[in-house]
Image (cartoon, grey):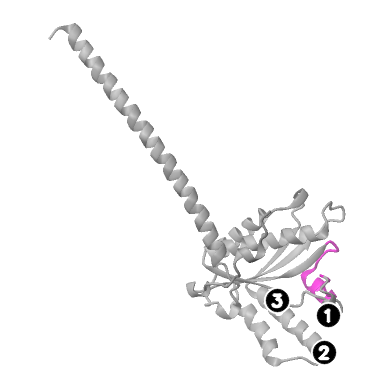
């Protein structure tokens, strides 16, 4: 074989290998892109499934296992990324754990006793339930609106932002297998309750040490639970609630 022919043959082999490698590379890249698309589809589906799985899981359903601090940190981080008009970030959270969560239970029980006795509707079992709920929970989080005096947003928009932050917390808790429940116990001033206006009583404001710009919207009870706590829910078909034009 002549040196020229040998060189040409080697060049042909190199070119063929290069073409084969390029073809392989392009096919592999296309395959990766398809995997990425499928992965994104899976993520979208799993997000929807988590939303559909979310339930209010009540303290009586908690199993007594402690919830790791990292779970609550993740829930709060998710809350931070809720939509917020003008970036006012109007949420304010007070997290109670350990002995402090029992203090919340005592406050809720005693506040109930005072208001229910005045109206003639006091029940011992309801008083005890409030104590048990606090004891059964790993954490109790006061969910507050912190509305600055110079806010450009209507109050309702900032309340909605806090509610969306709480939904984010619910979803992360659900993803991690942790139950949570939003309660409005003792939130409303009894004198304003019939109007449904969000006006806190002086008792809850004093307990939470709220500033004049802050309003408590409720409590998030958080606790470990079994998988069967996330039962199938009931909702009407979305077509009943949507008008397309």
Alpha carbons under labels 1 and 3: distance apart? 19 Å
Residue position for label 1: 190
Circle 2/circle 1 CB separation < 8 Å: yes
Q: Residue furthest left?
A: 1
Q: Earlier in the sequence, mark 1 or mark 3?
A: 3
Residue 113: where, in percent of width, then height?
Answer: 76, 87
Observer able to see residue 191: yes
Disc 3 is placed on an element classified as helix
Q: Is residue 35 above or below residue 3?
A: below
Q: Is residue 168 above or below residue 178?
A: above
Residue 26: where, in percent of width, then height?
Answer: 38, 32
Disc 1 is placed on an element classified as loop
Q: Is residue 198 above or below residue 39?
A: below
Q: Earlier in the sequence, mark 2 or mark 1?
A: 2
What are the residue bounds of the magenta stretch?
Answer: 198-213
Residue position for label 3: 104
Residue at 58% across / 81% down in the picture?
A: 60
Residue position for label 2: 119
Image quadrant assignment for residue 191? bottom right
């Amino acid at each position: 074989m002549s040196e020229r022919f040998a060189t040409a043959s080697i060049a042909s082999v190199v070119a063929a290998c290069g073409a084969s490698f390029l073809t392989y590379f392009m096919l592999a890249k296309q395959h990766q892109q398809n995997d990425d698309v499928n992965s994104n589809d899976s993520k979208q589906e799993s997000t929807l499934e988590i939303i559909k799985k979310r339930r209010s899981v009540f303290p009586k359903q908690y199993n007594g296992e402690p919830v790791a601090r990292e779970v609550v940190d993740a829930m709060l981080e998710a809350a931070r990324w809720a939509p917020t008009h003008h970036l006012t970030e109007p949420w304010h959270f007070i997290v109670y754990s350990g002995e402090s969560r029992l203090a919340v239970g005592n406050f809720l029980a005693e506040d109930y006793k005072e208001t229910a006795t005045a109206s003639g509707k006091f029940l011992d079992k309801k008083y005890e339930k409030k104590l048990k709920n606090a004891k059964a929970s790993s954490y109790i989080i006061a969910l507050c609106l912190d509305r600055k005096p110079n806010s450009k947003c209507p109050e309702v928009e900032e309340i909605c932002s806090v509610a969306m932050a709480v939904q984010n917390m619910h979803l992360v808790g659900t993803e991690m297998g942790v139950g949570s429940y939003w309660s409005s116990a003792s939130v409303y001033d009894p004198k304003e309750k019939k109007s449904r206006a969000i006006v806190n009583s002086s008792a809850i404001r004093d307990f939470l040490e709220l500033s004049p710009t802050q309003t408590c919207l409720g409590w998030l009870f958080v606790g470990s639970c079994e998988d069967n706590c996330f039962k199938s829910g009931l909702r009407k078909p979305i077509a009943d609630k949507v008008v397309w034009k």
